Amino acid sequence: MMSSVLKALSQQPRRIATGVYVRAYSSNTEVPTFETLAVSVPKPNVFHVELNRPKKMNSFNYNMWIELQKCFCSLSDNPECRVVVISGQGKHFTAGIDLHSMVELSQKANEFEDVARKSNFMYKIIGLYQDGITSLERCVKPVLAVSHSACVGAGVDLLTAADIRYCTQDSWFQVKEVDIGLAADVGTLQRLPKVIGNTSLARELCFTARKFDAAEAKDMGFVSQVLADRDSAITHALSVAEDIAKKSPVAVQTTKKCLVYSQSRTNEEGLEHIRLINQVMLQSEDLSKAAMAQAMKSDPPEFENL
Ligand SMILES: CCC/C=C/C=C/C(=O)SCCNC(=O)CCNC(=O)[C@H](O)C(C)(C)COP(=O)(O)OP(=O)(O)OC[C@H]1O[C@@H](n2cnc3c(N)ncnc32)[C@H](O)[C@@H]1OP(=O)(O)O
């Protein structure tokens, strides 16, 4: 009796206190902890990262930009993690950059009198913020994003860096940056045209900052699927994540690396890249295990973590 209770408890997704690593799901799964992000392990090898500033509409303050980078870097390195789902707690997915922290930032920059020092400060900050978003793309594990209700400004940057996007029926999106007097600088301008494969529409959305809803997002290919509400969207994303997590991590991670590498390079460069990786990876036990199971029509094999 006691052992089944302990087993059930060990399989509960765990909420995490700030600043320490705790164990979750199984005895050897470690989960990083943050102030602005809640990380849990709801299914084997599937990590769930939630934007966790619901009272501030999950707006991105300085800490959130930094923690995003730390979180995805750590999940990328964590062999227990094979797939990541990211969503937001509370009323909206995110209201974009925290406008109060943006004012504080420009006040800090103004402490420098000289234009070169001021610019150098801003250059470093923009780099840190870019790293927060790009960490989703640099993470070698697939990242599935779930957006609900509002996704504004930096939220769109974040979604474009994810591998797969889902949203709820009540979702709307806005490349809001021009409306607050700036050119988007953390990824939307680079990634959105490629994500939707339509430069005319991408430019329209970026120049006008007009809102687009779930139906339009689906129509333009920004999201793969529209789900009824946040819970069903997260359930769906976790189920897709669970399927991916059962596959060979060698195959899945190499596929992500190759897709990301190839998105801004010629086919020739992309083909050489995968050729160099696969001259090694085709020798992995994963290939023989998976190919044998396919050939024998037997159950899919289990793979070692990578
Ligand atoms: C180097 C820079 C790199 C990055 C650049 C990124 C740029 C961007 O992200 S541009 C976009 C900036 N965001 C916005 O302009 C959004 C502003 N907010 C809204 O439009 C609405 O609040 C929203 C549609 C998100 C939600 O509307 P709702 O009616 O549901 O709630 P509100 O009553 O408006 O807001 C509730 C409280 O949240 C505060 N709040 C909302 N957004 C932000 C924000 N971005 N930053 C800080 N605080 C925010 C809002 O003031 C309310 O607070 P309170 O009055 O204290 O209850």
Image (cartoon, rainbow, N blue to C red):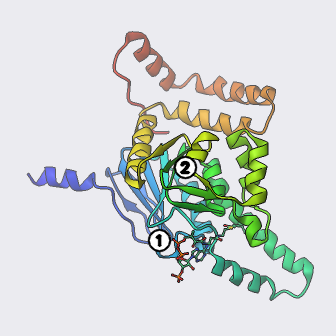
Instruction: Report how far apart the C-alphas of labels 2 and 1 lie in the structure.
Output: 21 Å
The correct choice, above or below, for 246 with respect to 21 in the image is above
Three-letter amino acid code of the residue under disc 2: Ala
Mark whose residue sits in front, 2 or 1: 2
Q: Residues within 10 Å of mark 2 (few under 14, many from 20)?
A: many
Q: Going by the image, does 259 lie left or right of 249?
A: right
Q: Earlier in the sequence, mark 2 or mark 1?
A: 1
Q: Report if residue 214 is visible in the image.
A: yes
Q: Position of residue 215 (x, y in %)?
A: 56, 46
User: Which residue is denoted by mark 2 in the rendering?
Assistant: 214
User: Which residue is denoted by mark 1 in the rendering?
Assistant: 54
Three-letter amino acid code of the residue under disc 1: Pro
Q: Report if residue 79 is visible in the image.
A: no
The correct choice, above or below, for 211 with respect to 34 in the image is above
Could you say which is closer to the camera, residue 139 or residue 87?
87
Instruction: Name the secondary structure under disc 2.
Output: helix
Residue at 91% x, 80% y: name it.
115
Residue at the top extreme of this rendering: 296
Tell me, for residue 279, which label it has, or none: none
Instruction: Name the secondary structure under disc 1.
Output: helix
Q: Going by the image, does 262 lie left or right of 291?
A: right
Q: Quadrant of ligand 1?
A: bottom right
Q: Position of residue 194 (x, y in %)?
A: 73, 41
Residue at 40% x, 57% y: name it.
40
Q: Going by the image, does 40 lie left or right of 161?
A: left
Q: Position of residue 68 (x, y in %)?
A: 58, 62
Residue at 68% x, 41% y: name it.
196
Q: Residues within 10 Å of mark 1 (few under 14, many from 20)?
A: some
Residue at 49% x, 48% y: name it.
84
Q: Position of residue 69 (x, y in %)?
A: 61, 60
